C-alpha cells in the first residue's frame, strides 16, 4: 500500500511539473506574438519596409461637385493601381470652402503619408501645412491649379494644363468666326461692342489664368481690327485694363460672389443683359453651368430662333449640359483639359518624388472640341458627362 501511495504521489508530482512547463511555454508564445505585432505596428507607423502594406499617398482636390473631379479621381486611382500605392481622394463640397480643405490637409498629414498631391484653393491658408510637410520629409506635388506662390522647394512638381495657353485657343476660335470679325470692324467709340466673360472666381490660379489667357488673346485680336489701345477690360480689379485710346471694344468680366449655381447664373444673366454683347465665354464647367442655367440649357443660343441667337458662346471643360450645347451647335465649341491625365500624372509624380526621383512639371494638354470633332477618337475620351 505504501508503495502504491509513493507511486501516486510521484505521478502527481510529475503531472504538476509538466503543467508548469506547459504554462511556461504558453506564456512565452504569447509574449513572442505580442512582441512581433508591436514591432510590425511600429515599423508601419515609422514608414519602414513592410511587405504587407502599400505606401500611402494623400490626394486632395479643390472640389468634388463637378464631374471633372470624378474623372481626375479615376486617373489617380488607375495610377495608384499601377504603382501599387494606396490613395485617398477627397475635396471640399464647394470651391469656396477653403477652411474645409485646410482641415482635410491637416487630417491627411496626421496619417503620415509618403507623399501629398494637392490642388490648393488658397496657398496662403496652407503655408504652415506646407512647412510641416517639408520638415517631415513628405514630398508635395501639385495638380490642376497646383500650389501657386508656394515657397521655393516646398512643391516638387505640378501636373496641370497650361491654363493660360489653353484659354488662348478659345479666343483664337472666337475670332475665326466671320460674324465676330465683321461686328468688331464695324464698332465705334459711340457704340462699342462687348465680349462677355463669366469667371467662377478670381482667386484660383487656374481660373485666373483661363480668364487672363482668353482676355489677353481677345484684346490682341480685337486691337488688330480696331487699333491698338482701343479695347477696354472692366468688371474686376484682377482683370481690369484701361484703354489708352477710343473704346471700340469692351471685354466685360463678371465674377460671382460665391461659386453657387445661383450666383454664377446671376452673373451670366448680367453679362448677357449688357448692351451690344456679341460673345460670351465661361472659363470652367461651373461658369458654363451658370450660362446654361441663364439660357434654358443653352437653347437660347439657337441660331434660328433663340433669344440670344446673335451671341456666340464658348466654354471650357465639359459636362453633360455643355456637351449637349456644343453638339446642338448652341455653343461654338469649348476647350477641354485632359482630367484623366491630371489625376494620373499627379499620382505618378507623387510616387516618383517619394522614391527620391527627380521630377519636373508636366503639361497635361488641352484641345478644342465642337459639334464636328467631339466624337473623334482623340477627343471623346476627354469630354466627360
Image (tube, rainbow, N blue to C red):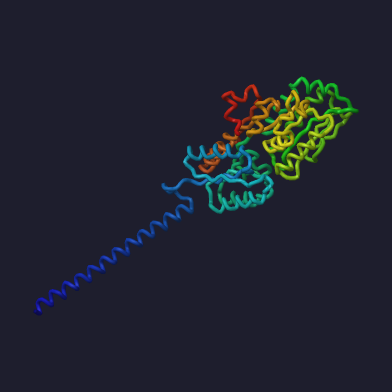
Give the vertical position of 53 relative to 228 (above or below).
below
- At x 69%, y 25%, the residue is 329
Picture coordinates of residue 99, whole percent (x, y): 66, 51
Residue sitting nearer the eye, 38 or 203: 203
Task: Assign the N terminus to one quadrant of the image.
Answer: bottom left
Residue sitting nearer the eye, 316 or 260: 260
| Number of marks drawn | 0
Residue sitting nearer the eye, 76 or 291: 291
Give the vertical position of 13 relative to 98 (above or below).
below
- At x 43%, y 49%, the residue is 50
Specify the quadrant of the image occupied by residue 195. top right
Picture coordinates of residue 357, whole percent (x, y): 53, 39
Q: Going by the picture, which residue comes out furthest to the front? A: 305
Give the vertical position of 100 relative to 343 (above or below).
below
Task: Assign the C terminus to one quadrant of the image.
Answer: top right
- At x 77%, y 29%, the residue is 307
Picture coordinates of residue 115, whole percent (x, y): 55, 45
Residue 139 visible from this viewpoint:
no
Q: Going by the picture, which residue comes out furthest to the right? A: 190
Residue 87 visible from this viewpoint:
yes
Picture coordinates of residue 275, whole percent (x, y): 84, 32
- At x 66%, y 45%, the residue is 94
Left or right of 229 in this view: 37: left
Left or right of 160 in this view: 245: right
Specify the quadrant of the image occupied by residue 32. bottom left
Specify the quadrant of the image occupied by residue 24. bottom left
Give the vertical position of 165 relative to 3 (above or below).
above
Amino acid at each position: 500500500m505504501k508503495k502504491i501511495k509513493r507511486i501516486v504521489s510521484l505521478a502527481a508530482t510529475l503531472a504538476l511539473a509538466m503543467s508548469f512547463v506547459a504554462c511556461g511555454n504558453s506564456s512565452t508564445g504569447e509574449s513572442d506574438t505580442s512582441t512581433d505585432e508591436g514591432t510590425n505596428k511600429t515599423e508601419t507607423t515609422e514608414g519602414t519596409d513592410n511587405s504587407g502594406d502599400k505606401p500611402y499617398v494623400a490626394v486632395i482636390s479643390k472640389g468634388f461637385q463637378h464631374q471633372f473631379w470624378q474623372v481626375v479621381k479615376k486617373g489617380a486611382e488607375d495610377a495608384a493601381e499601377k504603382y501599387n500605392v494606396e490613395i485617398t481622394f477627397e475635396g471640399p463640397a464647394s470651391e469656396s470652402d477653403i477652411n474645409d480643405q485646410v482641415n482635410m490637409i491637416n487630417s491627411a498629414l496626421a496619417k503620415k503619408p509618403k507623399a501629398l498631391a494637392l490642388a490648393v484653393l488658397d496657398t496662403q491658408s496652407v503655408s504652415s501645412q506646407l512647412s510641416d510637410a517639408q520638415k517631415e520629409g513628405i514630398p508635395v506635388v501639385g495638380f490642376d491649379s497646383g500650389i501657386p506662390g508656394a515657397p521655393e522647394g516646398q512643391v516638387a512638381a505640378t501636373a496641370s494644363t497650361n491654363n493660360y495657353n489653353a484659354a488662348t485657343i478659345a479666343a483664337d476660335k472666337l475670332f475665326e468666326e466671320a460674324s465676330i470679325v465683321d461686328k468688331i470692324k464695324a464698332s465705334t467709340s459711340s457704340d462699342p461692342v462687348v465680349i462677355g466673360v463669366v469667371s467662377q472666381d478670381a482667386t484660383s490660379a487656374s481660373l485666373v489664368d483661363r480668364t487672363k489667357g482668353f482676355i489677353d488673346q481677345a484684346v490682341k485680336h480685337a486691337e488688330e481690327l480696331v487699333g491698338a489701345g482701343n479695347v477696354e477690360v472692366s468688371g474686376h480689379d484682377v482683370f481690369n485694363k484701361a484703354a489708352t485710346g477710343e473704346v471700340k471694344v469692351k471685354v466685360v468680366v463678371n465674377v460671382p460672389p460665391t461659386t453657387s449655381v445661383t450666383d454664377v447664373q446671376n452673373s451670366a444673366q448680367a453679362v448677357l443683359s449688357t448692351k451690344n454683347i456679341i460673345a460670351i465665354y465661361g472659363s470652367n464647367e461651373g461658369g458654363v453651368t451658370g450660362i446654361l442655367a441663364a439660357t434654358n440649357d443653352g437653347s437660347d443660343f439657337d441660331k434660328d430662333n433663340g433669344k440670344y441667337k446673335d451671341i456666340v458662346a464658348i466654354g471650357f471643360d465639359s459636362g453633360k449640359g455643355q456637351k449637349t450645347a456644343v453638339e446642338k451647335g448652341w455653343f461654338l465649341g469649348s476647350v477641354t483639359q485632359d482630367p484623366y491625365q491630371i489625376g494620373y500624372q499627379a499620382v505618378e509624380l507623387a510616387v516618383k518624388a517619394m522614391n527620391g526621383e527627380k521630377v519636373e512639371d508636366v503639361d497635361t494638354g488641352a484641345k478644342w472640341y465642337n459639334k464636328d470633332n467631339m466624337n473623334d477618337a482623340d477627343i471623346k475620351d476627354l469630354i466627360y458627362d
